[in-house]
Amino acid sequence: MMGWQALFYKEILRFWKVSFQTVAAPVLTSLLYLLIFGHVMADRVKVYDSVSYAAFLVPGLVMMSVLQNAFANSSSSLIQSKIMGNLVFILLAPLNHWSWFVAYVGSSMVRGLVVGLGVLTVTLFFADLSLVAPVWILVFAFLGAAMLGALGLIAGLWSEKFDQMAAFQNFVIMPMTFLSGVFYSIHSLPPFWQTLSHLNPFFYMIDGFRYGFFGISDVSPWLSLSLVLSAFVIVSGIALSMLKSGYKIRG
């Protein structure tokens, strides 16, 4: 087994050993969102004429779960290793920055996609979904998971304690996720908030992902793809640069 494969395998085992917490809990949370919002808002909100509000919610909840769990995997792994002191064992291994990146981002993608698949499977019992363009679903799911895995790397490298990590998650990831159109169409927002939403890369991930189910979206899926891909390249470049320099992990 090559170095990056060993680290990748270690990271997979790390979250799978506590799958009740890392996989089952997020699935339950998303199901509660669907049951509560889908029931309360079903008769009050109509986003697309041919799509029920419950069905509209499902892709957003799936993608939200993918993004949040992909970020949580890489960020929590690094900060825990820093604080517990076992990061030194990885530093001693002959691994270059690309090996770290592939292993951490790859394992984050696995966790995010497993949770997303779990959410989709459970919510299918409560909403009727179609698959208009499955390729778009896969593209945005993989690209979104990879980007948040890389962003989690940046957060984990930057943070020196759990408080800093919690601040990054609460003041960056959570607002960007909830203001990305998971529960609504941005066309229902005032002009200022519509403009702000268009600056949020999470919006394009969710909108493009939702297009794969309904063939309807707030913006062109090609525009979403280009912007998400650009964001991924930028975030990955920053993460690789930090890993190469040993930012806050090498004395």
Image: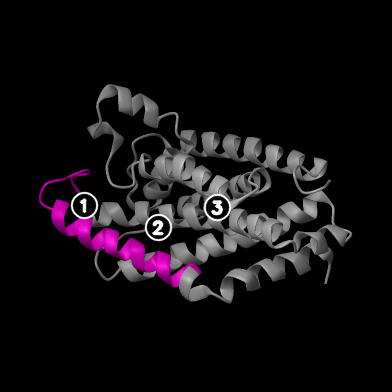
Three-letter residue code for mark 1: Tyr
User: Disc 3 versus disc 2: distance between alpha carbons?
Assistant: 14 Å
Question: In the figure, is residue 58 to the left or right of 5?
Answer: left
Res. 42 mark: none
User: On screen, 226 above or below 5?
Assistant: above
Q: Residue at x 60, y 53 (%)?
A: 75
Name the N-terminal-most of marks 1 and 3.
1
Pick the front one: 151 or 117: 151
Pick the front one: 11 or 82: 82
Dominant secondary structure (helix, strand or loop) of the stretch shown in magenta: helix
Q: Residue at x 72, y 52 (%)?
A: 101
User: On screen, 190 above or below 44?
Assistant: above
Three-letter residue code for mark 2: Val
Q: Which segment is the magenta one?
A: 22-51
Q: Report which residue position mark 3 lands on.
A: 71
Name the N-terminal-most of marks 3 and 2.
2
In the rendered image, residue 24 lying in the magenta stretch gets the answer: yes
Q: Residues within 10 Å of mark 3 (few under 14, many from 20)?
A: many
Q: Position of residue 143 (x, y in %)?
A: 56, 49
Q: Nearer the viewer, mark 3 or mark 2?
A: 3
Q: Report which residue position mark 2 lands on.
A: 62
Name the N-terminal-most of marks 2 and 1.
1
Q: Nearer the viewer, mark 1 or mark 3?
A: 3
Q: Position of residue 90 (x, y in %)?
A: 80, 61
Q: Quadrant of residue 24?
A: bottom left
| Circle 3: element type | helix
Three-letter residue code for mark 3: Phe
Q: Report which residue position mark 1 lands on.
A: 53
Q: Residue at x 80, y 49 (%)?
A: 97
Disc 3 + disc 2, Cβ < 8 Å? no
Which quadrant is the N terminus positioned in? Answer: bottom right
Q: Residue at x 32, y 50 (%)?
A: 214
